[in-house]
Amino acid sequence: QVQLVESGGGLVQAGGSLRLSCAASGRTFNRYTMGWFRQAPGKEREFVTYISRSDGTTVYVDSVKGRLTISRDNAKNTVYLQMNSLKPEDTAVYYCAGSASCVYSCRSAASYDYWGQGTQVTVSS
């Protein structure tokens, strides 16, 4: 079992920045592809980004390219989401997720085995 705990959400003005963290329990963190998803009010959960367990390949949804950056520190069992140039449409609950099996093409929520509880990000205009 892997437990994921997100932190770092909050309220920020448009154009501002936040850094989300997701701390994982267990000793096999480096074996998991880690992803971030988000869910805005009244909308379905959507893929944001993932970082592959194998070679650190990163993939982003088009709407966040150039503004959000995923990274991981395997020594600290933590994955990060640096969020710059935030827009009101980035407002959502952000979830981190871990997959033991997916290596590439990990955009589907169904590919992930473990989920955090979510952290709220609100961007005001």
Image: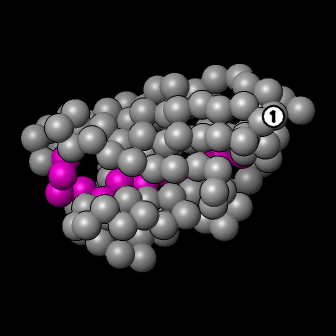
Provide residue 15's location: percent of width, then percent of height: 78, 36
| Direction from residue 101 to residue 26 in the image, left or right | left
Q: Which residues are magenta?
A: 29-41
Residue that sits furthest to the left in the current view = 27
- Label 1, secondary structure: give it: loop
Q: For this view, does 94 lie left or right of residue 89? A: left
> Is residue 27 depicted above or below 124 in this figure?
below
Asked whether 90 falls inside the magenta stretch, the response is no
Quarter the C terminus occupies = top right
Q: Amino acid at mark 1?
A: Ala
Q: Is residue 33 magenta?
A: yes
Q: Residue at x 53, y 32 (%)?
A: 19
Question: Splitting the image into 4 quarters, where does residue 102 fall?
Answer: bottom left
Q: Residue shown at 36%/42% (left/top)?
A: 79
Asked whether the viewer can see residue 125, the reply is: yes
Q: Nearer the viewer, residue 102 or 30?
A: 30
Within 10 Å of the Cα at label 1, are there few (<14), some (14-19), or many (20+) other Cα atoms?
Answer: some
Q: Residue 120: percent from the left, percent from the top? A: 62, 30
Q: Residue, x 51% and y 50% (percent of image)?
A: 69
Relative height, residue 75 to residue 105 (above, below): above
- The residue under label 1 is 14
